[in-house]
Image (spheres, grey):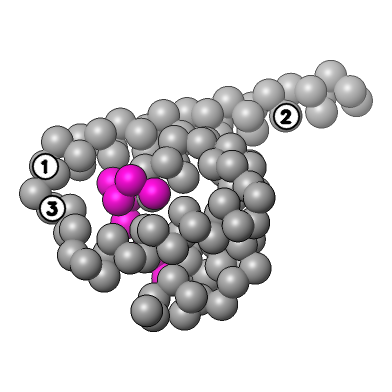
Amino acid sequence: MSLVISWSMGVIIYTVFVYDIIECIIELLNMSNMDNLIYTKEHKYVISQLKKARLEAGLDQSDVAKILKRQQPFVSRIELGQRKVDVVLLQKLAKIYKKPVDYFLSK
């Protein structure tokens, strides 16, 4: 039974690892067209608030990545403005940082 569990966990870990690699490749391809990134004043504010909230929560990027079941570069790319944050992810981050969603949106 432990062999089956070990094998299953290995497949799950391998699958997650492969998924992360594929996502990184896609993002690198998208980053080659940096003109698509929108660095408006509002976007910069959201990014700064995300980083500020993480630091106030006493978390590093690796901590947040583990909670999200992602790799650390995922969080780094968000904070660098290289990855878009959708509403669902913003809600998850707000919950992790114990902040209301509007904390990240309003000045």
Identify the residue under disc 2. Answer: 9
Q: Residues within 10 Å of mark 2 (few under 14, many from 20)?
A: few
Q: Is residue 106 visible?
A: yes
Left/right placement of residue 9 relative to residue 76 reads: right
Q: Nearer the viewer, mark 1 or mark 2?
A: 1
Mark 3, residue position: 36
Of the image marks 1 and 2, the number of the one nearer the N terminus:
2
State which tag comes first along the sequence, 3 or 2. Answer: 2
Where does the C terminus fall, quadrant-wise? bottom left
Give the vertical position of 61 relative to 103 (above or below).
above
Within 10 Å of the Cα at label 1, are there few (<14), some (14-19), or many (20+) other Cα atoms?
few
Whether the residues at callouts 1 and 3 have beta carbons within 8 Å, the answer is: yes
Is 12 above or below relative to 49? above
- Circle 3: is it few (<14), some (14-19), or many (20+) Cα within 10 Å? few
Taking the spot 20% from the left edge, 42% from the top edge, the residue there is 30
Instruction: Say what secondary structure mark 1 lies in.
Output: loop
Instruction: Name the image quarter holding the N terminus.
Output: top right
What x and y, as percent, mark residue 103? 48, 75
Q: For mark 1, what is the residue?
A: 33
Label 2 sits on what residue type? Met
The magenta-colored residue range is: 79-87
Tell me where residue 63 sits by quadrant. top right
Q: Is residue 98 left or right of residue 20?
A: right
